[in-house]
Image: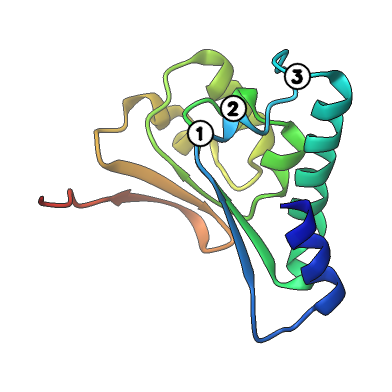
């Protein structure tokens, strides 16, 4: 990924963008992981933190999904622009969300543990105020 990002920075072709999608982001973007060496963890986090901070200048965008936001680097969480917040009940996750997402008001934050399945709160640059959204189930 670092190679793709560096290539995009060098080329900076504005007609093409690079979208990085990270599912289960708490497994990859955690500053608390003990699964690898400190050097590798530092390199990995520095790479993602650079992308999230600087990538927009080069048409590089990141989408992350996680059920454990408290395990993700606070630098990364705070640099995101839009959040779709589904039900969270873990106190550490709720505190992390409240602490790092400036777009979220207290009423919206307090409602997160009570959100129904398929319901989320959209907060960020896309919405002037946090908005509750109902996501329709996909019929298979």
At x 87% / y 73%, what residue is drawn? Answer: 10
**Distance in Å between CA atoms under marks 1 and 3:** 17 Å
Q: Are marks 2 and 1 in contact (CB under 8 Å)?
A: yes
Disc 1 designates what residue? 24
Relative to 93, residue 46 above or below: below
Disc 2 designates what residue? 27
The earlier-in-sequence mark between 1 and 3 is 1
Q: Is residue 96 left or right of residue 120?
A: right
Residue 123, x across and y down, in percent = 51, 50
| The quarter of the displayed image where residue 54 is located | bottom right
Q: Are marks 3 and 2 in contact (CB under 8 Å)?
A: no
> Are there few (<14), some (14-19), or many (20+) residues within 10 Å of tag 3?
few
Front disc: 3 or 2? 3
The residue lying toward the viewer, choosing from 74 and 51, is: 51
**Distance in Å between CA atoms under marks 3 and 2:** 12 Å
**Residue 36 image label:** 3
């Amino acid at each position: 990924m670092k190679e793709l990002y560096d290539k995009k920075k060098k080329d900076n072709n504005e007609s093409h963008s690079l979208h990085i999608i990270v599912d289960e982001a708490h497994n990859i973007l955690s500053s608390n992981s003990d699964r690898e060496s400190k050097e590798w963890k530092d390199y990995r986090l520095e790479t993602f933190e650079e992308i999230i901070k600087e990538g927009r200048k080069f048409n590089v965008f990141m989408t992350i999904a996680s059920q454990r936001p408290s395990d993700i680097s606070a630098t990364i969480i705070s640099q995101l622009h839009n959040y779709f917040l589904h039900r969270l009940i873990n106190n550490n996750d709720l505190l992390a969300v409240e602490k790092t997402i400036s777009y979220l008001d207290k009423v919206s934050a307090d409602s997160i543990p009570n959100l129904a399945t398929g319901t989320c709160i959209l907060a960020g640059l896309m919405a002037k105020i946090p908005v509750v959204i109902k996501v329709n189930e996909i019929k298979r």
